[in-house]
Amino acid sequence: MPYMILAIDQGTTGTTVVLFDSQFKVVSRGYQEFCQIYPTPGCVEHNPEDIWKSVLASLDAALTKSGADPSHIRAIGITNQRETTVVWNRETGKPYYNAIVWQCRRTADICEYLKDQCHEDMFRKKTGLLLDPYFSGTKLTWYFRNVPDLREEASKGKVASGTIDAFLVWKLSGGKAHVTDVSNASRTLLMDIESLSWNEDLCSILEVPMNVLPEIKGSTEIFGHTTDVPGIPDGIPICGIAGDQQAALFGQSCFQPGEAKCTYGTGSFLLMNTGSEPVFSNNKLLTTVAWKLNGGTTYALEGSTFIAGAAVQWLRDGLNIIENAADIEELASRVPDTGGVTMVPAFVGLGAPHWRSDARGLISGLTRGTNRAHLARAVLEGIALQNVEILYAMESDSKRKLLRLKVDGGASNNNLLMQMQADLLGCTIVRPEMVEATALGAAFLAGIGAGIIKNTSEITGMGNEYRSFEPEIDDDERKAVLERWHTAVGKA
C-alpha cells in the first residue's frame, strides 16, 4: 500500500500543509492565510483559533488536490513559527487571550528591567539567548501580569501554555497531549540548553508557574496521535517536530558542523550547525538546539532579522509601489544599482548582531533622481545586507569561513536577491529545487520518527536539485556598499 507523510508548516502569516510520497516528493499542498492583529504600535497578535482553522483549511485543500486516501498517511510532522506563545484552558481548549507573536515588542520594558537587575548574564549562560521581547518567556510574564485570573487558574492546574507546536499537538490529539520539542523549548528563555529541561530559577524570575509548561521531547519521538481531526483518520502518529528554522536546517541536509542555511520568510534566519556542543557567541548571536535524534543533541548558532519578506509586503501594501510581492524583482532590475539609496528595514527594531529594539526603519540617500525602482532595489539590498552582518559574526564565533550558504523560503525564488546576496557575502549561494525546506525538514523528521528513514545519511541530497549563484563584484565595490550600510544603520 502506498503511504504518505503529512507536514504542517505553520508560519507567521499563514499555514501550509504538504503531502509527500514515500520518496519525499511533493504530492500536493494547501495554503491558508489568517489575520494579523495589531492592537497597538509594536504589538502583534494572532487568534489561535484562526491558526487552527488555517491548518484545517490547508489540510483539506492538500487532500482535495491530491485525491489521495487519507488512510495512507503514515506520519505527521510539524514545523512552526517558534517564539509565538499561547495560553489556553486544559478543560475547554479555549485560549485565554490571543497568541503573542514573535515580532511583538510589548515586553521591552520587562526585558529592560531584568537587565537592570543583572539577570542577562544568567539567561545567556543557561539558555544561549538574550533578554529580548522576541522570545517566549517574557510573553508569558506579560500574560500572567495582564490576563485576569490567569494566575489563579494556573494554581488550579487549568492553564496550558506553549509555542504553536504545542498548541497544534493539543488540537490534533483532541487535548490528550501537552508536549513540545526541544528546538522550540530552546527559544523560550526557560529551558537549560545543556540539560534540556525547564529551569526552576529562570521560571521563577519570569514569574511563570512550571505546571503550565509542556513536556519536552526529542525531535522524532511520538508526540501524540490524531483524534477527531476532520478529514483524516484517528491514530496517525505525530512523530516529527522542529521550529521552522531548525526544520529548514534539517531539510537542507546541513548535518555536518559548519554547514549553514538562510531562510527568507517574514524575517530572515541564518543558522549554522555547530555539532554536539553548544557554541556561545561573542557577537550577540543565539545559541540554540537544532534537533535531538536518538538521544544525541545537535546545536546551532543563529542570527535572525525581524524583517525580510515583510519589507516587500510593505512596498506592496504600505506604499502601493508593486501589486504583487513577486513584482519587485522585475522593478528592481530596471536600474543597475540603488543610486546611493540605502534602506534599513528596522520596522520592529534590529535583530542580530545589534539587538536594538529602539531602532526604526530608515531610507537614506534620496535625490530628485530617485525613483521607485531604486527603492525596490534598496529594499532587496537591505534584506541581503542584514545577513552579511550576521554571517561575519557567525564566522568569527565558529572560527569557520563559510564558502557555501544554502537558501530557502519564499523570497529565495527571487534571482536578483540571491545574486545580490552572493555578491555582498562574497560566497556561493545554493538554492534547492524545492525552497519549502521547512516542510521538507518536518517530513524528514516524521519519517525518522515513523521508522521510514533510518538515519540522516539516507536524506543527504534526496532528490533536490540545486542552482548556484556566484559573486560577481570585487572586494572594493563590496566594501563601499558595506560602509554605506553601516552609516545608515548608525542612524536607524
Image: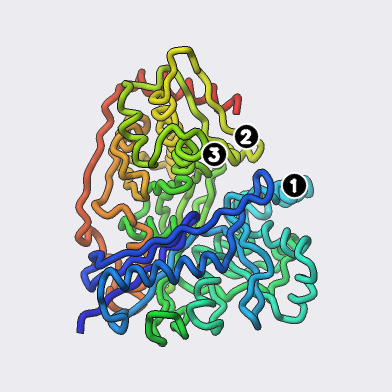
Query: What is the distance, in whole Å, between disc 2 and disc 1 at their CAs?
Result: 15 Å
- Tell me the crowding category of disc 3: few under 14, some 14 to 19, or many 20 or more residues within 10 angstroms, Cα based: many
Disc number for residue 353: 3
Q: Which residue is mark 2?
A: 359
Q: Earlier in the sequence, mark 2 or mark 1?
A: 1
- Tell me the crowding category of disc 1: few under 14, some 14 to 19, or many 20 or more residues within 10 angstroms, Cα based: few
Quick one: which residue is furthest to the top in this view?
368
Q: Residue at x 44, y 64 (%)?
A: 79
Quarter of the view holding residue 9: bottom left
Q: Earlier in the sequence, mark 1 or mark 3?
A: 1
Q: Quadrant of the C terminus?
A: top right
Q: Quadrant of the N terminus?
A: bottom left
Tell me if label 2 and label 1 are in contact, CB under 8 Å. no
Tell me if label 2 and label 3 are in contact, CB under 8 Å. no
Tag 3: amino acid = Pro
Tag 2: amino acid = Ala
Disc number for residue 109: 1
